[in-house]
Amino acid sequence: MADRPTSVDCWNYLNGSLLDVKVYTANEKEPEDRNLWPRPLARKWTVMLFMGTCLLYCARMAMPICAVSLATSFHWSKIDSGLVLGGFFWGYCFTQILGGHASDKMGGERVVFISAVSWALITAGTPLLAHLGSHTLALLTMARFLMGLTQGVFFPSLASLCSQRVVEGERGFLMSTMTSGSHLGTLLAGGMGSLMLDSYGWENMFYTIGFLSGLWALIVWLCLLKGSEFPTKQMETSKDPQWSLSRTCWLSLLKKPPVWAMVFAHMCLSSSFYILLSWLPTYFKESFPHATGWVYNVIPWLAATVSALVGGYISDFLINQRYSVALVRKIMQFFAMGVSSIFIVLLSGAVTFPTAVICISAAVGLSTFSISGVSVNVQDLAPSCAGALFGFMNMLGAFMGLVSVSLSGYLIEVTLSWATVFSLITLVNVTGLGIFLILGDASRVDLEDYSRVIVI
């Protein structure tokens, strides 16, 4: 674990951040930790991973954006469209733990590269599958399922990389920078869809995103991976030279209250996020039928892109000012789940269109602070298996997202009121936040002889 500096002001922090050309050091006793990225390499990987998450979400959103065109072309019902779209999430649940474990063992760099090559091929091949035969529905459902399988390893790999390659005081900003690309990818996919669907057809949407994803993977291979060695961090205990993901180890981790507090909070936030992601366009279309579509489809995600970077910077700045890591994680999660819920509650009453856009943008933007809260907390608690543990909680989060989206649709159908959905989001957020504030921590729990040094 890295020793935090005694003091640093904003300017010095920026000068000593990822733009510096010095080498990361864990502490004065380990000035040459070969597992950590040198700063020039860290800067390159940060830029490339930001672009990678952007393209990942472009590929993920291609099918939802083209769903209407596909339904028209192949005469799909709403049930058929839902089957194809839902196939992604079922595949996404399966490879979370596997991807994280593989990253912990062989290095997240390689897993990210393999993932990108796979989803690039699947995306570019989707139009070919659609025109392959009469079983279009089954083939595209399978394609979405495979897309979920290949993309499911990506974010656990990011968690593993941050744990193995980056010191504690800089993980929040780095993780926020990389994952903020997902919001930019959502924006770009929507913009590309608006331009390409009418003029060039839905097939070219998939070809373009598949080509760009493949090009990204090629650049990563040629510039960063080819001929490089990435050792994995060795974690020592009094009994074993390296932490192993055996049944005993998993049982030991899952007995820790801070682990379950983190997992539960992530599940609750994921549930709320998937509800907003899935139903916001419908809410605006029904509540404000004459509003301009690009306003509510773009502004919230633009706000999220910026706020993710701001949240990462604030969290690292507080840690480098010697605030407790656990306290910082809870502060960030309070804004992500507590303060954001206030803006959700405001939507339950009668609001104007500008007010609704502002409230949604604030809620979605603040929710990204969780990247520097629960999402990074996994690296505080169990850095030796951060990828696998993040995959575990992301799997549960994705499953809860499926359940909550279905439940919210049922509530809208039965009650004919959006207030019930917003109340559900608030209840879920407050419950998860309360558990995390009470039981959450940032002390190592993955090594038996590790002494607790972080106290709130």
Image (spheres, rainbow, N blue to C red):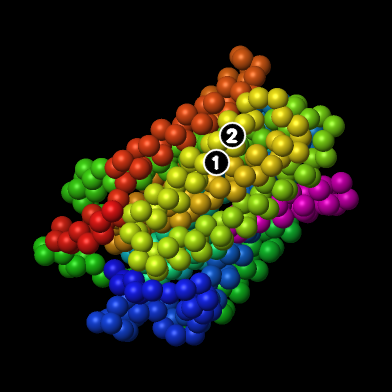
Which quadrant of the figure contains the N terminus?
bottom left
Nearer to the camera, 377 or 13: 13
> Residue 180 location, x and y as percent?
58, 57
- The amino acid type found where label 2 is placed reads Ile
Find disc 2 in the rendering and name its residue: 344
- Image height of 363 relative to 410, above or below: below
Q: Is residue 322 left or right of residue 416?
A: left
Find disc 1 in the rendering and name its residue: 340
In 3D space, how far apart are the residues under numbered discs 2 and 1 (Cα atoms)? 7 Å
**Numbered tag placed on residue 127 in the rendering:** none
Q: Is residue 395 left or right of residue 309?
A: left
**Residue drawn where x is 35% and y is 43% of the image:** 437
Kindly tell me whether residue 207 is visible in this rendering: yes
- The amino acid type found where label 1 is placed reads Ser
Query: Is there a contact, CB below 8 Å, between mark 2 and mark 1?
Result: yes
Please rate how many residues cluster around mark 1, counting C-alpha atoms within 10 Å: few if below 14, some from 14 to 19, many from 20: many
Res 436 → quadrant: top left
Q: Does the segment drawn in magenta span residue 362?
A: no
What span is in magenta?
178-205
Nearer to the camera, 409 or 139: 409
Q: Is residue 454 left or right of residue 284?
A: left
Across the whole image, how many numbered discs are drawn on residues? 2
**Residue drawn where x is 38% and y is 74% of the image:** 7
